[in-house]
Amino acid sequence: MTEPDLTYVFGGRDPIAEVLPGQVLLTSTEDCFGGAVLSIDDLPSKVCQGRFNPVTGPFQVPGAMPGDTLALHFAAIRPARDWGMSAVFPHFGALTRTHATAMLHEPLPERVWQYDIDTTAGIVRYRARHSDYTVELPLDPMLGTVGVAPPGGEVRSSIVPDLHGGNLDTPELRAGTTLYLPVNVPGAMFSLGDGHARQGQGEVCGVAVETAMHVTVVVEVLKDTLTPVPRIETDHQLISIGVARPLEDAFRGGYHDLVLWAAQLTGLDVLDAYQLVSQAGRAAPGNVCDPNYTMHAAVDTAVLHGVTGYGGVHRRLRDVGRTVPADVLETPPGTAFGTMR
Amino acid sequence: MTEPDLTYVFGGRDPIAEVLPGQVLLTSTEDCFGGAVLSIDDLPSKVCQGRFNPVTGPFQVPGAMPGDTLALHFAAIRPARDWGMSAVFPHFGALTRTHATAMLHEPLPERVWQYDIDTTAGIVRYRARHSDYTVELPLDPMLGTVGVAPPGGEVRSSIVPDLHGGNLDTPELRAGTTLYLPVNVPGAMFSLGDGHARQGQGEVCGVAVETAMHVTVVVEVLKDTLTPVPRIETDHQLISIGVARPLEDAFRGGYHDLVLWAAQLTGLDVLDAYQLVSQAGRAAPGNVCDPNYTMHAAVDTAVLHGVTGYGGVHRRLRDVGRTVPADVLETPPGTAFGTMR
Amino acid sequence: MTEPDLTYVFGGRDPIAEVLPGQVLLTSTEDCFGGAVLSIDDLPSKVCQGRFNPVTGPFQVPGAMPGDTLALHFAAIRPARDWGMSAVFPHFGALTRTHATAMLHEPLPERVWQYDIDTTAGIVRYRARHSDYTVELPLDPMLGTVGVAPPGGEVRSSIVPDLHGGNLDTPELRAGTTLYLPVNVPGAMFSLGDGHARQGQGEVCGVAVETAMHVTVVVEVLKDTLTPVPRIETDHQLISIGVARPLEDAFRGGYHDLVLWAAQLTGLDVLDAYQLVSQAGRAAPGNVCDPNYTMHAAVDTAVLHGVTGYGGVHRRLRDVGRTVPADVLETPPGTAFGTMR
Amino acid sequence: MTEPDLTYVFGGRDPIAEVLPGQVLLTSTEDCFGGAVLSIDDLPSKVCQGRFNPVTGPFQVPGAMPGDTLALHFAAIRPARDWGMSAVFPHFGALTRTHATAMLHEPLPERVWQYDIDTTAGIVRYRARHSDYTVELPLDPMLGTVGVAPPGGEVRSSIVPDLHGGNLDTPELRAGTTLYLPVNVPGAMFSLGDGHARQGQGEVCGVAVETAMHVTVVVEVLKDTLTPVPRIETDHQLISIGVARPLEDAFRGGYHDLVLWAAQLTGLDVLDAYQLVSQAGRAAPGNVCDPNYTMHAAVDTAVLHGVTGYGGVHRRLRDVGRTVPADVLETPPGTAFGTMR
């Protein structure tokens, strides 16, 4: 991963490459520290030069226009290293004063943790700093940050989640899922990064198990199709992501979209959908530390008589993703990509 | 269930019965409508006379004193009817203006849904009101409201969740779990009710699948033991429940307690525990509609090297609960109870 | 002030005296520390035995019934001492972690400040603790806590503000104003206390310049008259008080009521009133530290063509208050009272 | 005002002109509708083409570098028209569902109000839409939106307030005040607009009395001087502006900065300053409708022994502003400007 392929914002940057609708993109991402934290003695406040959360991109999708929806199916998200880093650092996280929640306390101390990542065993290994406690946690790779250029000519820091996606920091964004984002500018101009070997729900200390990733994405454009909030589809679930502060507004945003999406797909009256989703819905915080909080609302498609979103595009892209030869998936890719339509 | 056994507040009421530490309580609860909603034509605003959420109790536990912890192990929570009711009603729920979130819109219309409950098949059946859409959802019985008398001489509506428990409305409070609450007054004076045949995470419309329940509870008192927030223990998880508005404060409250609880049980330094729980924690909203919001934070005890809370009381109570003969469990009980120590 | 006249809750207590509608009540209140903080070396956490915010009452108003409004006109609020106390203490205040906003920081240190109160000069004198800095601030006496018994059989701590009034902590509650509260139980059962020699808007550290007060109140009951939120009327303003968390919900609650109140009094269409109040309204936080936050919304009655609330009761009570002989007002009163109708 | 001088973002635009430190800028601003709402029949959703809140700029200040502070003294803010417009429109305002606070209600209807502005009499005249009610309100001109280019390469919509200023929407930003903003990019690149003939505190319906303005600004750069949040200084007050959601975080942000600023200027210990500001502080919401909420915290400099911020720059710029000849101030200026150092 070379610096020219990394950016710290969504919007306002020239594309590093084109990906056609229907193509499969094989690319790589750096960790949220730009790879600068190499040991537990590398304090992010010292070694990162104030720059956090680089993303790879932007990628331009010819033909994508405002009013369309960009569908990104994550065929694979594989750790590119056998180690990951996490940290507690000043003015970040949910259990400390921050720039947004200003208080008179001294900040919490800064500390770094290094994890082993074992992709074969499917685990990440935590090691305490102040004792010899260790424990293995399930490996569950995801991307914290995937987004498009925002509307209105805005350029947003990659730290920020909003309706253009960005730093959603939800564990739901794992391999096998399709992310839907609105297209706001010609070419969509999507970027991705901030891989997590795993993350707790809410990312309470503000930092996950951060690592570089190899990512395989099937790209599609759904013409003249609006997507009001970032949405994820899995083989069995519809997921809407609310992005707001305070957290109840993120909760509202996710469920509001899910109720209307479910009503649209099933033909249910809106109040009937509201009732059904109230009993069947699941919700969890993605992050409660970024400039906007995120919270997803999900429902099993079985509850909705097996509907699929956007006319079944998730299943189609999933099947495309499965055609990528294993040896291609195993090749550390740079930003190579190939047509798989 | 007769009215004298029901109350609409926590605190300030004479006990309806005593339960000794170590005893098993077999009792029943009414639904949140006091059983007054019998068909989809019974609008709660009309038939409930402004009274909602009756709880059965209070039960006095001799010997329980302020500074102790009350442990309630739910050996069984079984629907007492083959139907449940839900509703959307004015000024309640997360996607509508409420008394707390005042707006100039007209309220949403009032509507009732009736569900079939099939305990043998383990399902509840949803039926749309404006179409013939039906679907089966998994039966997952829980109690929405369990609490003790609050501290400071307060008497709180059963609608309110707070540190004394009350209307926590979390699906995590199902059979097989142990709830820990602080004892604030001599005898603890606990009550329970508000059974849900199932509930979505966040209870977005404000009402679950409400039904009467038969409940079997093993009661224990942990002397000189503080419990800062309501906690739940299962065979595999520690759960802390945050209760606050805005929702991020409920999130903070749950995780803050979980971090300190995990640190205490494992001997981990607090920042080491903060880091570990950040990667392993799960969180979900219970309700985002009551006067306080609730959100739980949970961690698998496997991550904590298999620790158990409170010296293993959960496992001990669970084993006691398993000794209750099935035919006793099957007997609709009123408020009968027997010693099982 | 003797202990029997003090209580720490609203609701559930027998009255200490009766006050007839139209009577003038002369009474006294203790400070929020119960008078136990006598010097800067008396730390509240040590000397207050965990009890804060005593109020004088409850007073029963014969004839007041649920559905009525209680009007309390504050003819005089006079410091009963020539000193006041303030403090910063752990887990309280807006710029520190609290029980509701849980964080992992150590709490801020506890510290007490003593103020001189000079009623003749109309000033309170601040003295720094860590230097010899002093400054005089305008004396502006107010009551932090005035409320009635809450509805639904609840008993609420005097620390809590809600729709029954209570710990509103707004500087707007000074002499010359009329407070309107809903009557929830027969006799209304109102109590008052928590005098502040002055308070900043928002009470950011959580404690004002606390002192005992002599209070003269003209009491009236408005039959069959609903008051949705606590309201204050002055000679020139209508004020509605929102009580909620998060703070924007308190903001909404105050303005929502003010818009509807203005529409009702002027005959303006609701959207026309919304527009007018949007341009003419003033708003400020009362407290951002109590279990509920408060925020008032105000509009000059001149903007509303000189309307008065509740048929002019404020002006009538104000005129009654002015008939109280000065020597009576100057007499430290205990809980004496006399008819002034 | 020609379109080339207007922009809808902060950051990422070439300057329209240079202003040297010490110079006086005479410029004009359009209203938030871009001047497109000319009568009560012009619905913003129809006539504004989805573009709101144009600002004039950016102006480049040679020599201003990151780490400096930009001081903008508003010598004059004069309505450029004898009419202003306001509106209620869908999904905007504090008492309606919005994109951030999603609900299932239909939006409130859209409606426009036209005000007369009489600069000689110093009034704006409100006219109801659904009756013949009119009333005069005091003219109190202010700028809703003044900001610099944000840090980190971001480009932000002019609708958004944040630490770079932007859509602060506080009535405190009137003539006679000095606004301090951090410089984030070389040249500072400031823009201004969104004039309000007057605005209520909190801007509850989301729209003030919007009008074009002639603005006279004295510009200064304070080298190597950090400004953590937008600050305003008047002849008698220090004001810090908190920008965040939820509203209590904006409250915290304003008071947190004010406490530290007061401590720095007076030499008071931080807790001593916290205590003093708690008793003397004033606070009010600016907007509770924009993507971030704003709330100011203020203290009289008399309370701080007459200190002035930034070494007295406010008084110096104020004196410069007073040297501008009245006939220059009266000349509608385009974007003319002249050196006044």
Image (cartoon, coloured by chain):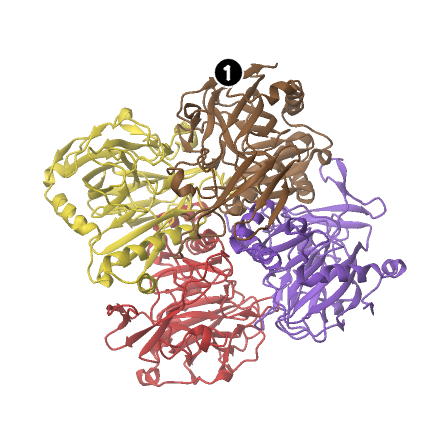
Chain colours: A yellow, B red, C purple, D brown
Q: Name the side, left or right, on which A90 lies relative to A69.
A: right
Residue B129, quarter of the rendered image? bottom left
Whole-percent x, y for residue B307 in the image:
38, 59
Residue D201 visible: no
Q: Position of residue B88 (x, y in %)?
A: 39, 67
x, y percentage for residue A161?
Answer: 37, 41
Question: Residue at 65% of width from left, 60% of height from top?
Answer: C50
**Position of residue B204 measured from the top left corner of the image (x, y, whole percent):** 38, 61
Residue type, numbered disc 1: Gly
In the rendered image, the quadrant that contains the C terminus of chain B is bottom left
Q: In the picture provided, is B109 more to the left or to the right than C232?
A: left
User: Where is A317 relative to D265, above or below?
Assistant: below
Is residue C75 in view from this perspective? Answer: yes
Q: In what quadrant of the picture does the N terminus of chain B appear?
A: bottom left
**Nearest the camera: B319 or D316?**
D316
Residue toward you, B132 or B12: B132
Front-most of A7 and C104?
Answer: A7
- Residue carrying label 1: D63
Tell me if mark 1 has few (under 14), some (14-19) or many (20+) residues whose alpha carbon lies within 10 angstroms of its own: some
Tell which residue pokes out farthest to the right in this image. C327
Q: Secondary structure at mark 1?
A: loop
